[in-house]
Image (spheres, rainbow, N blue to C red):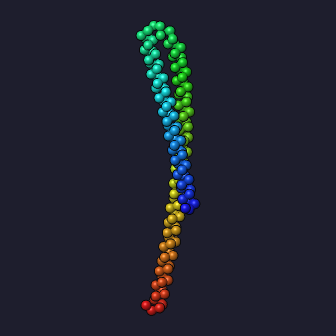
C-alpha cells in the first residue's frame, strides 16, 4: 500500500466520522423540533381545558408564561444545534475536497507509473528488434 493509498484511506475514515457526527446533530435537531411541537400541543390542550373549565383558567396565565420560557429555551437550543450543523457540514465538505485531492494525486501517480512502464516496454522491444536485425534473422 502506497502512501497515497494510506492518505485516501485516512481521509475516507475522516469523511465517515464527519458523516456520523452530522447524522447525530441532525437527530438532536429533530428531537428538539419534536419537543417544540409537543410543547405547542400541550399548550393548546391546556388552553382548551381552560376554555372548558373556569377552574383551570386560573392557572392558565402561569402555565402560558412557563410555556414561553420553555419555548425560548428550546428555540435557543435549536439555533445552537443549527450553528453546529452548519460547522459540521463545512467540515464534511472540506474533508470531501481533501479526499478528492488525494485521489487525484494517486491517479496522477498511477498514470505516470503506467507511462514509465510503457516507455520501458517499448524500449525493451526496440532493443530486441535491433538485436534480431543485427543478427540477421
Q: Where the N terminus falls, by quadrant? A: bottom right
Q: Residue 8 in the image: x percent, y percent? A: 54, 55
Q: Is residue 88 visible?
A: yes
Q: Is residue 66 above or below residue 1?
A: above
Q: Residue drawn at (53%, 27%), measured in percent from left and top?
A: 74
Q: Residue 88 in the image: x percent, y percent? A: 54, 41
Which one is nearer the viewer's eye here, 87 or 55?
55
Q: Is residue 103 above or below residue 23?
A: below
Q: Residue 118 in the image: x percent, y percent? A: 48, 73
Q: Residue drawn at (56%, 53%), measured in percent from left and top?
A: 10
Q: Is residue 114 above or below residue 3?
A: below
Q: Where the C terminus falls, by quadrant? A: bottom left
Which one is nearer the viewer's eye here, 21 or 99?
21
Which one is nearer the viewer's eye here, 84 or 50?
50
Q: Is residue 98 visible?
A: no
Q: Residue drawn at (45%, 92%), measured in percent from left and top?
A: 136
Instruction: Name the residue furthest right.
Output: 3
Amino acid at each position: 500500500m502506497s502512501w497515497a493509498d494510506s492518505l485516501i484511506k485516512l481521509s475516507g475514515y475522516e469523511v465517515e466520522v464527519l458523516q456520523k457526527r452530522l447524522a447525530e446533530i441532525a437527530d438532536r435537531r429533530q428531537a428538539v423540533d419534536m419537543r417544540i411541537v409537543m410543547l405547542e400541543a400541550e399548550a393548546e390542550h391546556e388552553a382548551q381545558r381552560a376554555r372548558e373549565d373556569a377552574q383551570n383558567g386560573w392557572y392558565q396565565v402561569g402555565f402560558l408564561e412557563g410555556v414561553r420560557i420553555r419555548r425560548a429555551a428550546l428555540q435557543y437550543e435549536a439555533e445552537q444545534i443549527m450553528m453546529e450543523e452548519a460547522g459540521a457540514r463545512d467540515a464534511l465538505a472540506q474533508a470531501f475536497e481533501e479526499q478528492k485531492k488525494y485521489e487525484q494525486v494517486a491517479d496522477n501517480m498511477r498514470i505516470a507509473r503506467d507511462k514509465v512502464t510503457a516507455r520501458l516496454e517499448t524500449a525493451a522491444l526496440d532493443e530486441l528488434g535491433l538485436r534480431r536485425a543485427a543478427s540477421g534473422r
